[in-house]
Amino acid sequence: MQRLSADAPPNNQSGVSSEIVGFTPRTIDWNAVRVFAEKNLRIAMRYPANILVWAFLPLMWFAPYVLMMVAIGGGSSVHFTEISGFEDFIAFAVIGWFVYTYVDTTIWSIGQNFRWEQFSGTLEPLFVAPVPRTSILIGAAISDTVSTSISALIMLGTSCIIFGVGYAVTAIVPIILVLMMMVVALFGFGFMIAGLIIVFKDPSVLTELIDNVVFALSPVSYPIQVLPRAAQVAAYALPATIAIMTIRELAIGGAAEVVSFLSTIGALGLLIVAFWVLGLLCFRYAERWTKKRGSMGGF
Amino acid sequence: MTQSSFNQELQKREGFRSELCAAQAIAVRIWRVELSYPLSVLWFIAMPFVWLIPMLLTGNAVSGGPESVNLETLTGTSDWVSYVAIGTAVLGLTMSLMWGTANAFRREQNAGTLETLMTTPIKKGTLIWGALLHNIQHGGLGVVLQLVGSMLLFGVSLNIWGILPALAIIALMVIGMQGIVLTLVCVVLLAKQGWMVIEFLASGLTLLAPMAYPLAVFPPIIQYIATASPLTWSVDAFRNFLIFGLAGPAANQAVAALLILDTIYLLIGMVLFKRTEKYVRSKGALTQF
């Protein structure tokens, strides 16, 4: 982006600076990304209780699944081991929930950022600012990912203590790599939801529906083999499915086959491209649609 | 009717029947608002199943079939599908009661209708009772939908002799939960944005309630804490009646516990609500955001 100077002299009668007149936006302005991420993080850090709340609330949501597994299976389940390849179903579920926290954030937070700007009365000023919307979205996505990581790590640590599970840290680097690739692919998904939000304004029901369907398709507390065949195919189109399966293998087993790991990286790379293209197209279409109807700032 | 005679009619308006009519009018209005959003209707129908299906998939992954020996040891029934489907049927009702009723004031405030409603000649609590009436209808339909869907899709069988006692248990549950909800209304009135408290309390109560697992899976201290919740007794008795019929275990104990807990919670809730509403009015903070 061309830098705008506050004290640049106006060069025409209307008082518009030459920089603004000659401004041509780039697809992504990384400086604006950083500014938006910093702004959102600064606000998030003003409410540390929120980060703690989001560390413990998911624990209360997934604990019923673990308790039900214990009630039905007792200490272990031969059937579970046969279909999943893992003996400890509690360790299996806890790591699944840890990864799913990021998916939840994509669905509920990234897309909702424009809604919050709207409530703050800053959406219209943001949209007339000479920065690409993509930069605003990416900035929001980065800040949400940082605060989610803090909450998710607290949740993982607490779960390990409560449920008495442990994970191998030998493969921490590939775990972080897969997690990051999944998060980047999910940004695209977040852009799609942001588009839905600027069109429907408060699609809490739609978001709830999407979240629950994605959750049912993702192998969070059960292996993908228990899903019907068609649902398995749909599940593989979600970045979370491949990421959860690989991270689980790395975290519980401490290692993964090289070929399997590389194919995960390749698949996630493809999903990043697909989700970003689809997400940005959806968002731009939604933005044009909303602007045409003049309902950008409407509630 | 002239203005003065209309005002006289308003002045004369009193009694339980009038309040019930007002509560019903509030319930109908909330229904109208909900039904005017097609996505809300879709969510209402899909909700019981999108919550239940992941639980059934998880249970299936662990059990490998419709029976569980471990569950039989703990509860007396090996049919885990019926156990989970019936137990979680009251989840939607619980959420409706906790969220819908506790946020009744906040919803009106957001819509800009709270002050208008507060100047109408209805008792202040009627707004809450109206929201409660709607949520009983909304959540109750959800319970029926989940149970019928579970029978048709997952082969769950219900004991018909237990249906009426199970409904009585639901009534006792609603009374006890209303006491808790009135306390939550106080939080919303004081803190305005009480979602965090509602979320923690709703999640905590549903975690402690034996919806998909028996209390025996908890450590003893948590089992004792869980017995202080009317939801715990209600879920257990509701499911026992629908699985075992009138021969369900510890039915009398559950009814007695619910009667005691309902009295305590409702009394506390009503006293707190009365005092909080008075306090908030004295501060002039009723309609503040």
Image (cartoon, rainbow, N blue to C red):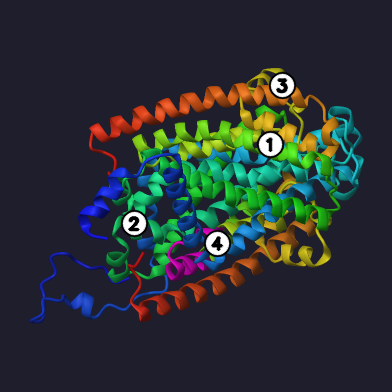
Q: Position of residue B223 (x, y in %)?
A: 69, 22
Q: Is residue B229 magenta?
A: no
Mark number displayed over residue B219: 3
Q: Residue at x 57, y 41 (%)?
A: A152
Do discs 4 and 3 share a chain? yes
- Would you say B258 lies left or right of B59 here? left
Mark number displayed over residue A119: 2
Callout 4 secondary element: helix
Label 3 Cα neighbours within 10 Å, binned few <14 / some 14-19 / many ≥20? few
Res A169 seen here = no
Callout 2 secondary element: helix
Mark number displayed over residue B168: 1
Q: Residue at x 54, y 48 (%)?
A: B135
- Which region is colored magenta? A191-207
Among the two numbered marks 4 and 3 on one chain, the one whose residue lies closer to the N terminus = 4
Label 4 Cα neighbours within 10 Å, binned few <14 / some 14-19 / many ≥20? some
Disc 4: host chain = B
Looking at the rendered image, the disc whose residue lies closer to the viewer, 1 or 4, is 1
Disc 2: host chain = A
Label 1 Cα neighbours within 10 Å, binned few <14 / some 14-19 / many ≥20? some
Rendered-image quadrant of the N terminus of chain B:
bottom left
Real-space Cα distance between discs 2 and 4? 22 Å
Query: In this figure, which residue is indicated by the disc labeled 4?
Result: B40
Dividing the picture into quarters, in which one does residue A127 lie? Answer: bottom left
Label 2 Cα neighbours within 10 Å, binned few <14 / some 14-19 / many ≥20? few
- Would you say A119 lies left or right of B39 here? left
